[in-house]
Image: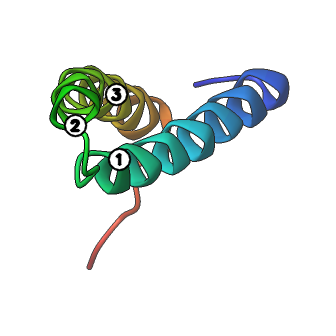
């Protein structure tokens, strides 16, 4: 379980990386092939960070009970 400050920072980080991923997906479509190639590399790293933050969120959030 995370304290309130840690949870807030995790949410803010997740939102920031989500915006970065969205912007990089647009940049991948750049007319300049070198820029597009670099964007692909950075996008792959950003997606990994996004996935890691999502995993942290899922393992630190209280489980919802289903009946």
Q: Nearer the viewer, residue 2 or 53?
A: 53
- Mark 3 sits on what residue? 46
The vertical placement of 62 against 43, above or below, is below
Label 3 element class:
helix
Residue 66, x across and y down, in percent: 29, 73
- Seen in the picture, residue 5 relative to 11 is either above or below; the reply is above
Identified at 47% across, 47% down, the residue is 18
Q: How far apart, in angstroms, are the residues tagged by discs 1 and 2?
A: 6 Å
Q: Quick one: SS at disc 2?
A: helix
Quadrant where the N terminus lies? top right
Q: CA distance from mark 3 to mark 2?
A: 15 Å
Instruction: Name the residue at 36% across, 34% down.
Output: 50
Q: Which residue is mark 1?
A: 27
Q: Name the spot of residue 20 as percent of width and height, x first.
A: 49, 41
Residue 55 placed where, x, y %? 31, 31
Q: Are marks 1 and 2 in contact (CB under 8 Å)?
A: yes
Neighbours of disc 1 within 10 Å: few (<14), some (14-19), many (20+): some
Q: Quadrant of residue 58?
A: top left
Q: In the orientation shown, which residue stands out farthest toward the right?
A: 5
Q: Which residue is mark 2?
A: 36
């Amino acid at each position: 379980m995370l304290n309130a400050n840690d949870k807030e920072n995790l949410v803010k980080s997740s939102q920031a990386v989500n915006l970065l991923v969205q912007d990089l997906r647009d940049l991948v479509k750049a007319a300049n092939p070198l820029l597009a190639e670099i964007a692909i590399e950075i996008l792959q790293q950003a997606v990994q960070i996004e996935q890691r933050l999502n995993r942290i969120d899922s393992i630190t959030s209280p489980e919802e009970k289903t009946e």
